[in-house]
């Protein structure tokens, strides 16, 4: 299947999140593996558990669970059939098909699964795409067996957005404020800060939704970082990467919003800042684990 025939989710995972740069992909995976490990730690997987990974993507958590416990079975669940096909091929190549099933489903509609049918539910960066987050928690609770465990990871994007007008991705664009604002409008139009599901919640909401769903034990760890960029990111990677599947790359946003002269001024100012890591990154993430 060519990239042009893939859905937005698989296009992003396999190309657009790292700008097609294999070194950048390795850095992404280096960042994600500790997240996977902490989600699995919260899941407390036991022998013969049935694990449902909602929004499995490329199978990072699911394959990690299969490696961690040789007796568990897993359900790869995602809205993307392309990603499920990719995961199924990988499971076949690894000789794990007998311990895996594949389900195309949304996080807020797991109706094809019976009540109390799994021991563990995991997610990673899934609820940021789900408007009906309470319904998703209700579904997680419904499909879990008594004493079943939920373990999730979510970015708390509200912490850093909207940015002050003089910042663009953490870099000071004061000298080209009007030009940078035109680029920001492209993203704000697609994901309005006041209503988009990526931005409409924080860690307190996660706790409230878990409690309202019925979980009797709920734990949450919030991690906040404010620091200069810690890794070099080549300009071409920055330009051709997309922050999530629903938005354009910076290169595409520039083409959509700026004249040639404006684009030249924008790049001339922003590129040196990125290449010299002269910015500030603000981020917050939450790990939540709960017991039915």
Image (cartoon, rainbow, N blue to C red):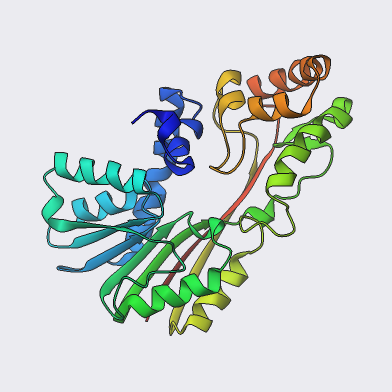
Side of 105 relative to 89 (left or right)? right
Residue 199 pos. (x, y %):
66, 56
Q: Write the residue at 20% across / 54% down.
A: 66
Q: Quadrant of residue 31?
A: top left
Q: Is residue 166 left or right of residue 102?
A: right
Tell me residue 131's x, y (percent): 58, 64
Name the image quarter holding residue 7. top left
Residue at 81% from the left image edge and 33% from the top image edge: 182
Which image quadrant for residue 184? Answer: top right
The answer to whether residue 73 is seen in the rendering is: yes
**Image point (46%, 43%), residue name:** 9
Position of residue 72 measured from the top left corner of the image (x, y, whole percent) = 17, 62
Left or right of residue 230, residue 123 in this image = left
- Residue at horizontal 61 percent and vertical 20 percent from the top: 235
Quarter of the picture holding the N terminus = top left
- From the image, which quarter does the C terminus lie in? bottom left
Residue at far front of view: 5
Residue 219 visible to the viewer: no
Q: Residue 34 or 215: which is nearer the viewer?
A: 215
Residue 174 position (above or below residue 54): above
Does 5 sit above or below residue 201? above
Instruction: Note whether 75 is above or below 20 in the view shown.
Output: below
Q: Position of residue 45 (x, y in %)?
A: 25, 66
Q: How many marks?
A: 0
């Amino acid at each position: 299947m060519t990239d042009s025939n893939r859905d937005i989710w698989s296009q992003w995972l396999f190309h657009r999140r790292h700008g097609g740069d294999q070194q950048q992909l390795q850095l992404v995976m280096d960042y994600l593996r500790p997240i996977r490990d902490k989600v699995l730690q919260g899941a407390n997987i036991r022998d013969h558990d049935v694990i449902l990974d909602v929004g499995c993507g490329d199978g990072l958590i699911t394959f990690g669970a299969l490696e961690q416990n040789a007796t568990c079975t897993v359900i790869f669940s995602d809205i993307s059939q392309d990603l499920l096909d990719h995961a199924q091929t990988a499971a076949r190549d690894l000789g794990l098909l007998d311990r895996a099933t594949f389900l195309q489903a949304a996080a807020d509609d797991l109706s094809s699964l019976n009540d109390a049918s799994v021991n563990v539910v995991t997610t990673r960066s899934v609820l940021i795409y789900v408007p009906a987050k309470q319904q998703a928690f209700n579904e997680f609770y419904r499909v879990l067996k008594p004493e079943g465990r939920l373990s999730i990871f979510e970015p708390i994007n509200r912490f850093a957005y909207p940015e002050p007008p003089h910042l663009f991705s953490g870099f000071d664009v004061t000298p080209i404020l009007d030009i940078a604002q035109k680029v920001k409008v492209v993203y704000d139009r697609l994901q309005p800060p006041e209503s988009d599901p990526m931005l409409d919640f924080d860690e307190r909401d996660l706790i409230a939704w878990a409690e309202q769903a019925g979980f009797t034990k709920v734990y949450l760890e919030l991690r906040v970082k404010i620091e200069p960029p810690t890794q070099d990111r080549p300009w071409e990677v920055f330009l051709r990467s997309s922050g999530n599947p629903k938005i354009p790359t910076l290169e595409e946003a520039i083409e959509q919003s700026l004249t040639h002269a404006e684009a030249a001024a924008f790049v001339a100012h922003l590129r040196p800042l990125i290449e010299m890591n002269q910015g500030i990154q603000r981020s917050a993430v939450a790990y939540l684990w709960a017991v039915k």
